[in-house]
Amino acid sequence: MTTHWIIGPGAIGRLLAHSLSPIAATTLLGRRALPEQQALSTPEGEQKVQPLNILTVAQLTSETHEPPTFVHITTKAMVAESALAGITDCISPSTPLVLWQNGFLAQPRITQAWPGPVLCATTTEGAYLTGDDGVVHAGRGHTFVGDLNNQHGALAEELAHTLTQVGLAATKVCDIRQRLWQKLAVNAAINPLVALNGVRNGKLRADPYAQRVEAVVREVAAVMQAEGIQPPNGGQGNGMSGEQAWLALVWQVVENTANNKASMLQDVEAKRPTERGAILGPLIESAKRHGLAREVLQGLDDELAEIEASF
Ligand code: KPL
């Protein structure tokens, strides 16, 4: 039986724990204690309650455990490295890690620092928490798994197979860096604007926000080109410029998620630090490196920093 440790009992962490528990020895790790009996509401509306093996990091470090086959890190991007540091004394340095973060901050840093294999996952599974003992799997999506240096294809294949087996459809890919940057591009165009203006995604289609979306996408598209990231769905093949293709994708996501409260808006409303460092940070850094315009991205980052400072 494989053993999975999942650090970060947020929505994706708990969804993973519920899904993997029936076939693998699964431990969910967090900073504070949570009830053992955990509820999952499926996209089909079924309610399932099952005991999950949930430990605090303090409990983990005070006991001996079977070595994990995979350690999943499902925390927010800015605490992924400290979450890993909290358990490194309990695992072998050759343990495969799976990073589930948004943006492109934790992934290159941990890939460089960790001696063992580091897989990255990007998912469109929709899930949210309903409290300390419940998670709603709101919509089925797809998960792509790969590693930044394409050195661990067999491991990525094994993980994608396991995830698919437990109902979380997944595919091993050789272009995970492209996919992480593509998601980051869309997140950068939507998340900061809705978080700063307190609106749901669909509002971005109208004045005064639409022009601001276009201004963000202009800077993002130039960074994507400099980073060698193709617009998804072969933008250029449709006769569109890179900028038009990115804008078309952003409007498509805004349409599909019109009623969503984006994750960054949820963070601002809950007075939690946002993932601006993982989403806007790599774009601003890259724009600096390549001598590209970054006024709009920097402006959004500064405004978010100011709001966070007031929490
Ligand atoms: O991924 C998202 C998020 O909320 O973080 C978007 C695409 C903005 C949808 O809400």
Image (cartoon, rainbow, N blue to C red):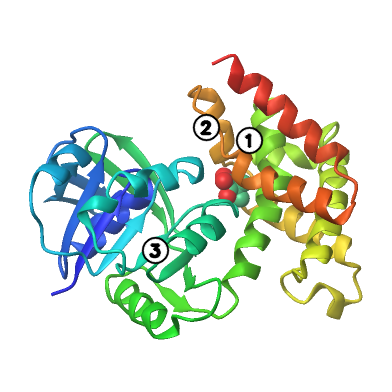
Q: Do the numbered discs 3 and 1 sit on residues whose CB atoms are within 8 Å?
A: no
Look at the numbered disc 2 and give the secondary structure of its residue: helix
Q: Amino acid at mark 2?
A: Gln
2 vs 3, front mark: 3
**Could you tell me how far apart the alpha carbons at marks 2 and 1 are, in whole angstroms?**
10 Å
Q: Amino acid at mark 3?
A: Val
- Residue 31 location, x and y as percent? 27, 35
3 vs 1, front mark: 3
**Could you tell me how far apart the alpha carbons at marks 2 and 3 are, in whole angstroms?**
25 Å
**Which residue occupies 35% across, 40% down?**
129
**Which residue occupies 36% across, 44% down?**
83
The residue wearing badge 3 is 98
**Could you tell me how far apart the alpha carbons at marks 3 and 1 are, in whole angstroms?**
31 Å
Earlier sequence position, callout 2 versus callout 1: 1
**Which residue occupies 49% across, 71% down?**
144
The residue wearing badge 1 is 200
The residue wearing badge 2 is 266
Quarter of the figure that contains the C terminus: top right
